[in-house]
Image (spheres, helix red, strand yellow):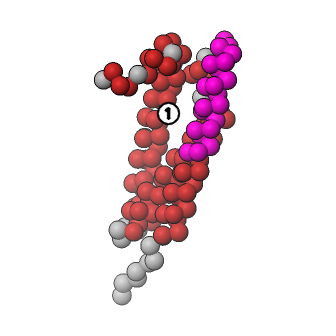
């Protein structure tokens, strides 16, 4: 006897919405911090702007992406444990890469200004 479970469509949509809404909050906090730093040019470096205020929305993005990814894997018939076993390490690794890259970009922005991030020159 086989049991077919209903795919977690609700979790798929909830994870997507959580990631998007956390991304909007992340964008607002990051833009506000960079705007305040550029006006004041305080001794506080841009790399130090990666505090708890910015980390909480980032964790929300990562959590939403993890739930979205695991739900997407479950839709293809994988059990929940395997889906989360695949999605959690993948999400943690990619989140670490993005967070470290954000720190490097903020340092680059601080040292060279907005012209240091000219992507059209490539």
Q: Residue at x 52, y 47 (%)?
A: 62
- Number of marks in the rendered image: 1
Residue 66 in the image, given as x and y percentages of width and height = 48, 53
Quarter assignment of residue 82: bottom left
Q: Is residue 23 left or right of residue 119?
A: right
The answer to whether residue 81 is seen in the rendering is no
Magenta: main secondary structure: helix
Residue 101 in the image, given as x and y percentages of width and height = 45, 29
Secondary structure category for the residue under label 1: helix
- Taking the view exactly as shown, the residue that stands out farthest to the left is 122
The residue where tag 1 is placed is 99
What residue range appears in magenta?
Answer: 23-44
Q: Residue at x 36, y 70 (%)?
A: 77
Task: Work out whether residue 16 or residue 80 is closer to the camera in this orientation and state it.
Answer: 16
Q: Residue at x 36, y 84 (%)?
A: 2
Residue 12 in the image, given as x and y percentages of width and height = 48, 63
The answer to whether residue 43 is seen in the rendering is yes
Q: In the displayed structure, would residue 52 be above or below residue 15?
A: above
Q: In the displayed structure, would residue 112 be above or below residue 15?
A: above
């Amino acid at each position: 006897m086989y049991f077919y479970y209903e795919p977690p469509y609700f979790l798929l949509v909830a994870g997507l919405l959580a990631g998007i809404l956390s991304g909007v909050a992340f964008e607002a906090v990051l833009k506000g911090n960079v705007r305040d730093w550029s006006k004041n040019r305080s001794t506080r470096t841009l790399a130090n702007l990666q505090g708890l205020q910015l980390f909480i929305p980032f964790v929300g993005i990562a959590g939403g992406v993890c739930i979205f990814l695991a739900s997407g894997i479950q839709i293809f018939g994988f059990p929940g444990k395997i889906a989360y076993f695949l999605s959690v390490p993948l999400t943690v690794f990619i989140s670490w890469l993005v967070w470290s890259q954000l720190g490097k970009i903020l340092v680059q922005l601080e040292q060279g200004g907005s012209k240091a991030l000219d992507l059209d020159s490539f």
